[in-house]
């Protein structure tokens, strides 16, 4: 497990910064976004420090498994957190990557947003 001592999400993983947890297993953590855009807004992150989606490596079976697991967790956690079922409800998944992608925290995270509109943004 890679850790970056200056990374806020690594500190959330180790518990030095508190979070409102949605899900946890040995590889993955999900927690509520501190500044939600939508009635339901949480983040899913790998526990290991991967700076962004730009570092996702198709030749690394651990990356492929991790990204597959995170993606497959989205519908389960969205429903768990109160999203209405597809297609009337549903959810939005967003992975901001790099400066042009609007990324502010450089530890890979999947935003999951759901709930009745209007939303604060988007
Ligand atoms: P991004 O702009 O995609 O890098 O998104 C970073 C997200 O992390 C923003 O939506 C922030 O509100 C959220 N965030 C920053 N610090 C925390 C924290 N301590 N706990 C929960 N969410 C956070
Ligand atoms: Zn990190």
Image (tube, helix red, strand yellow):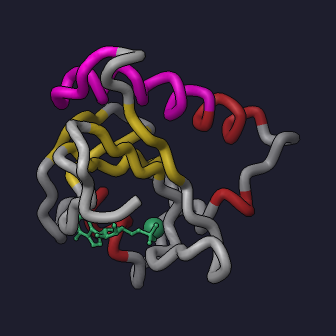
Q: Residue at x 53, y 59 (%)?
A: 108
- State whether the magenta stretch is mostly helix, strand or loop: helix
Q: Nearer the viewer, residue 35 or 37?
A: 37
Residue 118 horizontal side relative to residue 70, left or right: left
Residue at (20, 23) in percent of width and height: 80
The residue lying toward the viewer, choosing from 99 and 51, is: 99
Query: Where, by quadrant of the figure, is residue 11 drawn?
Result: bottom left
- Name the residue at 56% across, 64% down: 96
Q: Quadrant of ligand 1?
A: bottom left
Q: Which residues are magenta?
A: 68-85
The picture places residue 91, in percent across and down from the top left corner, at 38, 34
Instruction: Give x and y (percent) for residue 77.
Output: 30, 27
Please tell me how many numbered marks the rendered image carries. 0
Rendering quarter of residue 33: bottom left
State left or right for residue 67 relative to residue 49.
Answer: right
Q: Does the magenta segment cover residue 110?
A: no
Q: Is residue 66 in view?
A: yes
Q: Within the magenta stretch, is there residue 71? A: yes
Compared to residue 89, the image places residue 51 above or below, namely below
- Against 75, residue 26 (above or below) is below
Give whichever of 17, 113 is nearer the camera: 113
Q: Nearer the viewer, residue 77 or 83?
A: 83
Q: Residue at x 79, y 41 (%)?
A: 60
The residue furthest front is: 118
Q: Which residue extends farthest right?
A: 59
Residue 41 position within the rendered picture, expressed as x and y whole percent measured from the top left: 26, 49
- Left or right: residue 54 versus residue 34 is right
Residue 14 visible in the shown view: no
Please state the horizontal and vertical placement of residue 121, each as a whole percent of the image.
34, 64
Q: Looking at the figure, which quarter contains the C terminus?
A: bottom left
């Amino acid at each position: 497990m890679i850790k970056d001592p200056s990374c806020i999400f690594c500190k959330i993983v180790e518990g030095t910064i508190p979070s409102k947890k949605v899900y946890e297993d040995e590889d993955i953590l999900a927690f509520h976004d501190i500044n939600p855009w939508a009635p339901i807004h949480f983040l899913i992150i790998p526990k290991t420090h991967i700076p962004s989606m730009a570092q996702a490596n198709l030749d690394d079976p651990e990356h492929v498994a991790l990204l597959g697991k995170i993606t497959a967790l989205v519908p389960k956690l969205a429903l768990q957190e109160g999203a209405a079922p597809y297609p009337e409800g549903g959810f939005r998944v967003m992975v901001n990557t790099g400066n042009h992608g609007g990324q502010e925290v450089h530890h890979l995270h999947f935003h999951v947003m759901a709930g009745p509109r209007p939303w604060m943004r988007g």
